[in-house]
C-alpha cells in the first residue's frame, strides 16, 4: 500500500543572495575581527604559539589592542584579533541520504556518493538527472541538493582559538537548500553564493538557486539580509523572496505564492505512476512536485515540474511525503 502525506509548501516570487550580519566585528577597511576572552595564564606569546599562523603576528595584536606588555593580559578582558592571523582546522560534511547519480569531485578525481561519505573544502558536488543528495555538517546544519545541481564547497573549516565555524557553498548551477540552526558561537559564518552575490545566514531555512544568470533566494523560516556585491542588504523574512537578474538588478522582497491545493487528495494511488490533479493557483504557471521519505523533505526521491495534471514515476509502496509548490512567470 502506498501512503502519501501532503505538506504545505510555499513558492517564492524572488531570489538572490543573502547577506546577514555575522557575530564578527568588521574593521573600517573590511577586515574581519575575532574576539577572545583572556584566560588565566594567557600571554600574547602563548596565544600566538598555539593559535596564530605566525608567532611574530603577536605584535599586530599588541598594537591593535594597545597593550604595553604582551606578557601582562587582564583576565576576562577581550582581545581583538584579525581573523586572517588565526589558525583553522578543516571540517567535513557527511552524506546523509542520496539517490541516483551523485558525484563528489576531489580535484581531478571523482567518487560516487555513499551514506557517510565525506565532502571537504575544495570539493564539488554534482547531481545528475533525477538525483538528490543531502549532507550533514558538524553543527547539525543540513544542505540538500536536488537534481542537476553543481555546488562547490569553497570553505568548510573551524577557527581553532574561538571554535567559530566558517562554511561557504558556491552554487554554480541548480539549487541548494539549507537548514541552519541558530548561531551558537560568536563569529560563526554560513554563506551561500552564486555568481555575482553572496549570502550569509544563520538560524534560517532557505533555498538558493542559480540558472541562466539569475540568482534566486526563498526564505521559509527566519530572516535573511539580501544584497548584491558590497551593497547593504535588505532583510527578507519568512514567506518572502527576491530575484537578482542577469543584469544585476535586485527585486524588492515579494510574497511567496501560497500552497496549491490538490483535487481529491485522499484518492488511493493504485496505478503504476502517481497522478495528482492540482487546483489552479493564481500566479502559478507550473508546479513543482517533490516526494520524500521525510517530512522535512531533505531525503528526496522524486521531483518533477509539471502542469495542473502531475504524473510522477512509480515508487515502492510505503509511507511517503509529498510537497507541491507553485512556480510563477519568473520561474520562482
Image (spheres, grey):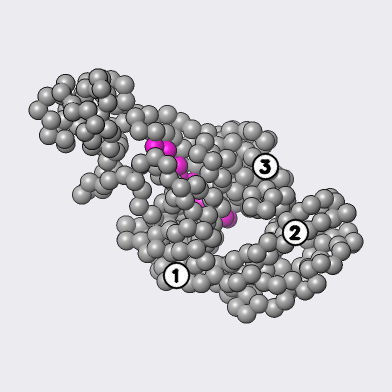
Q: Residues within 10 Å of mark 3 (few under 14, many from 20)?
A: some
Q: Is residue 138 magenta?
A: no
Q: Which residue is mark 1?
A: 253
Task: Indicate left or right for 293 with 80 as reference.
Answer: right
Q: Nearer the viewer, residue 210 or 4?
A: 4
Q: Which residue is mark 3?
A: 97
Q: Nearer the viewer, residue 126 or 67?
A: 67
Q: Looking at the picture, does residue 19 appear above or below residue 310? A: above
Distance (Cα) linking label 1 and label 2: 31 Å
Q: Residues within 10 Å of mark 2 (few under 14, many from 20)?
A: some
Residue positioned 50% across, 63% down in the render: 238
Task: Judge whether residue 78 can be spotted in this image.
Answer: yes
Q: Where residue 237 sits: x, y (%)?
A: 46, 64
Task: Judge whether residue 15 can be spotted in this image.
Answer: no
Distance (Cα) linking label 1 and label 3: 33 Å
- Image quadrant of residue 160? top left
Element on which disc 1 rests: loop
Q: Where residue 254 sits: x, y (%)?
A: 48, 72
In primary-sequence order, the first of circles 3 and 2 is 2
Task: Indicate left or right for 101 with 56 as reference.
Answer: right
Distance (Cα) linking label 3 and label 2: 20 Å
Q: Where residue 146 sits: x, y (%)?
A: 63, 52
Range covered by the magenta-colored residues: 164-175
Q: Looking at the picture, does residue 315 appear above or below residue 279? A: above
Q: Nearer the viewer, residue 116 or 320?
A: 320
Q: Are marks 3 and 2 in contact (CB under 8 Å)?
A: no
In primary-sequence order, the first of circles 1 and 3 is 3
Q: Which residue is mark 2?
A: 5
Element on which disc 3 rests: strand
Amino acid at each position: 500500500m502506498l501512503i502519501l502525506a501532503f505538506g504545505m509548501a510555499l513558492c517564492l516570487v524572488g531570489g538572490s543572495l543573502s547577506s546577514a550580519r555575522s557575530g564578527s566585528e568588521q574593521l573600517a577597511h573590511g577586515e574581519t575581527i575575532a574576539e577572545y576572552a583572556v584566560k588565566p595564564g594567557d600571554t600574547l606569546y602563548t596565544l600566538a604559539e598555539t593559535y596564530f599562523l605566525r608567532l611574530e603576528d603577536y605584535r599586530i595584536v599588541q598594537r591593535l589592542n594597545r597593550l604595553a606588555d604582551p606578557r601582562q593580559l587582564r583576565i576576562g578582558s577581550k582581545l581583538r584579533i584579525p581573523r586572517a592571523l588565526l589558525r583553522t582546522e578543516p571540517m567535513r560534511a557527511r552524506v546523509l541520504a542520496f539517490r541516483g547519480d551523485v558525484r563528489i569531485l576531489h580535484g581531478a578525481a571523482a567518487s560516487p556518493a555513499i551514506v557517510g561519505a565525506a565532502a571537504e573544502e575544495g570539493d564539488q558536488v554534482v547531481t545528475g538527472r533525477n538525483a538528490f543528495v543531502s549532507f550533514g555538517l558538524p553543527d547539525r546544519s543540513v544542505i540538500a541538493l536536488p537534481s542537476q545541481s553543481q555546488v562547490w564547497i569553497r570553505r568548510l573549516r573551524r577557527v581553532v582559538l574561538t571554535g567559530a565555524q566558517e562554511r561557504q557553498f558556491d552554487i554554480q548551477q541548480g539549487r541548494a537548500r539549507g537548514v541552519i540552526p541558530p548561531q551558537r558561537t560568536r563569529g560563526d559564518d554560513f554563506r551561500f553564493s552564486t555568481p555575482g552575490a553572496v549570502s550569509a545566514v544563520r538560524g534560517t531555512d532557505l533555498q538558493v538557486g542559480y540558472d541562466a544568470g539569475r540568482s534566486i533566494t526563498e526564505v521559509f523560516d527566519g530572516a535573511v539580509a539580501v544584497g548584491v556585491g558590497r551593497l547593504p542588504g535588505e532583510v527578507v523574512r519568512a514567506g518572502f523572496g527576491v530575484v537578482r537578474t542577469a543584469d544585476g538588478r535586485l527585486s524588492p522582497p515579494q510574497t511567496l505564492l501560497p500552497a496549491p491545493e490538490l483535487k481529491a487528495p485522499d484518492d488511493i494511488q493504485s496505478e503504476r505512476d502517481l497522478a495528482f490533479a492540482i487546483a489552479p493557483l493564481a500566479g502559478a504557471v507550473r508546479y513543482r512536485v517533490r516526494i520524500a521519505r521525510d517530512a522535512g523533505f531533505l531525503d528526496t526521491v522524486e521531483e518533477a515540474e509539471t502542469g495542473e495534471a502531475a504524473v510522477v514515476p512509480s515508487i515502492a509502496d510505503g509511507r511517503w511525503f509529498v510537497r507541491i509548490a507553485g512556480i510563477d512567470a519568473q520561474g520562482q
